[in-house]
Structure formats: C-alpha cells, structure tokens
C-alpha cells in the first residue's frame, strides 16, 4: 500500500514515521508513506496557498490551484483521495477495514479557515475524526494512517488484531499480567485455571459487561 499525505507542515510527521509500528511497517516494505508539502505546487511568486474569502469573513481559505496540481501529479487509477474535514463521515473501525484494501490513499490535510469549496470536486471521500475542532488535518491523518497500517498483512500478529476492541462491536476484555497480587488487587482465578473454555466464556461476558457500562451505544448499534 502507498499513502500520500498532503500537508503544509511536513515536520509534524517526523516522530510519527520514525517510531514503533509505523516505522517497522515502512522498513519491512509493508507500506510506503510520503509526506508532501503542497505549498511547493503554488504558482504564486511568494508561495501563497491561501487567501481571504469572497464575501468577507474571518480567516484565510486554501486556494484550489496548489492542491489540484499536487493531487493531479500523484493520482493514478488506483488512488482514493480523502479530504479530512468536519463535514465528513465520522471515522470508525469499519472504515479502516475497507480502506486497507486500496492500493493508494491520498489524505488531504486542511488548515486555516478551510478549503475553497471547489477542491471537493477532486476528492472521492470526506472523513471526520469527531465532533471537535483541531487546528488542521495533520493529527487526523496520522490517526487514520495508523489505524490502517496496523491492519495490513504482516504488520501485527493476526490473533492480536482479531481480539481487539470494536471488531465485534464490543470493547476488549480486561487483561492482566504479573504479579498475581498487586496491592491486594488479584488476578481473577479463572485466568489461572488453565481451562480455555471457561476463560473464553469469562472474557466474552466481561466484554459485554464492560461495553454495557462504558459504551452502551455500541450495543445499540450491534
């Protein structure tokens, strides 16, 4: 898979690409991730990519030309262009599972007051990571990239992925490790029993209990 992230602030991604699972996935050639500064595509003598909005109003608006030229220079028949915007569909695990099947994703990070409306015509999908305001699309693009890359074959152990939260519309079951007794808090006896059937039943029941308490909305969806 190839993921191109279009941004005005490429240095924000330095740590993201050089640590942990993302770093290993790149080194093992499971994914190619490119951070592209679309300011370089501006035809303005001063490299401007934004301007004041027609009709007045606060802030600056991203202009179409640099973004159109940037996307057109990298887009192929296999590409899916995604605009990160509050207007988009709220991102969920099901979306990550679908996006991992694409060969090439282009993630467009907004900034300032937003995008010129015409930029939407070159995009295929619109995603929001939640009903809150951020200064730009860089953090959402990292979130989406991380959630997709970890699903690619060979990046994370398959068994670990299958037992994660949201895969069954339930939160994950509680987990424990050594010591058995920590400040009077004990590991449940069933996990020490060696009875795999009882352990599986316990974990399933705990998933349902935990979801009812913390995220009942997931059970309503289920």
Image (cartoon, rainbow, N blue to C red):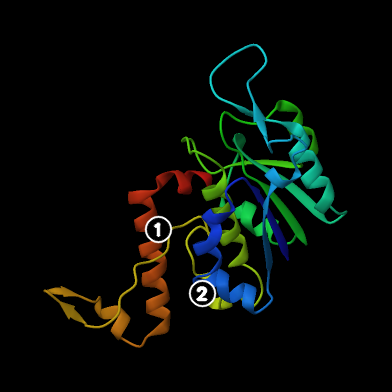
* Left or right placement of residue 40 versus residue 180 in this view: right
Q: Residues within 10 Å of mark 2 (few under 14, many from 20)?
A: few
Q: Residue 97 occupies which quadrant of the picture? A: bottom right
Q: Which mark is residue 208?
A: 1
Is residue 114 in view from this perspective?
yes
**Whole-number angstrom distance, CA of label 1 to CA of label 2:** 19 Å
Instruction: Decide which of 72, 220 is in the foreground and name it.
Output: 72
**Residue 207, position in %: x, y?**
40, 62
In the rendered structure, find residue 122 and report the number of the disc placed on it: none
Residue placed furthest toward the right: 77
Left-right relation of 194 to 145: left
* Circle number at residue 160: 2
Residue plotted at (79% across, 33% down):
121
Measured along the vertical axis of the image, is residue 124 above or below residue 161?
above
* Residue 167 appears in the rendering: no
Q: Nearer the viewer, residue 84 or 56?
A: 56
* Image coords of residue 27 (percent x, y): 63, 77
Which secondary structure lies at badge 2? helix
Q: Residue furthest top?
A: 55
Q: Quadrant of the N terminus?
A: bottom right
User: Would residue 128 be found to the left or right of residue 31 on screen?
Assistant: left
Q: Residue furthest left?
A: 184
- Nearer to us of marks 1 and 2 is 2
């Amino acid at each position: 898979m190839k993921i191109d992230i279009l941004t005005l602030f490429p240095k924000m991604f330095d740590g993201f690409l050089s640590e942990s699972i993302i770093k290993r996935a790149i080194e093992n050639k499971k994914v190619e991730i490119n951070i592209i500064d679309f300011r370089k595509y501006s035809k303005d003598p001063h490299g401007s990519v934004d301007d004041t909005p027609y009709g007045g109003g606060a802030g600056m608006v991203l202009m179409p030309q640099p973004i159109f030229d940037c996307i057109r220079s990298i887009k192929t028949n296999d590409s899916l262009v995604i605009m990160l915007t509050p207007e988009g569909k709220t991102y969920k695990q099901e979306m990550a599972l679908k996006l991992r099947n694409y060969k090439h994703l282009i993630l467009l990070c907004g900034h300032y007051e937003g995008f010129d409306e015409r930029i939407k015509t070159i995009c295929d999908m619109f995603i929001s990571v939640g009903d809150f305001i951020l200064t730009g699309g860089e953090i959402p693009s990292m979130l989406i990239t991380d959630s997709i890359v970890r699903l690619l074959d060979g990046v994370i152990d398959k068994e670990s992925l299958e037992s994660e939260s949201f895969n069954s519309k339930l939160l994950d079951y509680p987990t424990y490790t050594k010591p058995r007794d920590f400040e009077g808090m004990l590991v449940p006896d069933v996990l020490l029993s060696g009875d795999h059937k009882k352990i599986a039943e316990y974990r399933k029941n705990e998933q349902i209990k935990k979801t009812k308490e913390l995220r009942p909305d997931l059970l309503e969806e289920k």
